[in-house]
Amino acid sequence: MSHQNEFKKVLLSSPHVILGKKGLTDEFLAHVQRLLKRYKIIKIKILKSVATKSNIKNIADQISQATNSHVLDVRGKTIIVSKHQIKKKELKST
């Protein structure tokens, strides 16, 4: 399956994991790493209690650094993270 198809599939699916009021804990980050090993691209939803407009990208960067992954997309309170770096050109539809 191509990266574009995987990205679309994840984008339209329900979130793999939800970041709750406890924030970025070691257990949460370990769970994200396990999901990345299994699915390669995952969707993370952030609850309102944790996220504000100003800190969502900061949270995405913290998750990507802690799990050695790459942020593909941030839409509202939803983050899509990939195990491997994928260029934006590969994700655009033709």
Image (cartoon, rainbow, N blue to C red):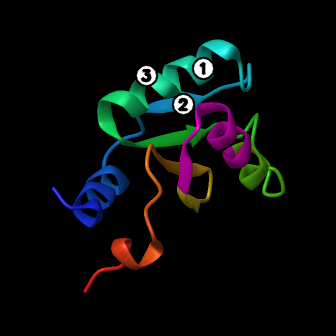
Q: Is residue 60 above or below residue 68?
A: below
User: Residue at horizontal 35%, vertical 73%?
Assistant: 90
User: What residue is disc 1 on?
Assistant: 28
Q: Percent x, y for residue 14?
A: 36, 41
Residue at the extreme bottom: 94
Q: Earlier in the sequence, mark 1 or mark 2?
A: 2
Is the C terminus in the top left, top right, bottom left or bottom right quadrant?
bottom left
Q: Nearer the viewer, mark 3 or mark 1?
A: 3
User: What residue is disc 2 on?
Assistant: 18
Q: Is residue 69 magenta?
A: yes
Q: Which residues are magenta?
A: 60-71
User: What residue is disc 3 on?
Assistant: 34
Residue at the extreme left: 1
Choose between 29 and 14: the one closer to the eye.
Answer: 29
Choose between 60 and 50: the one closer to the eye.
Answer: 60
- Corner quadrant of residue 22: top right
Q: Earlier in the sequence, mark 3 or mark 1?
A: 1
**Where residue 46 is drawn, which disc sits there?**
none
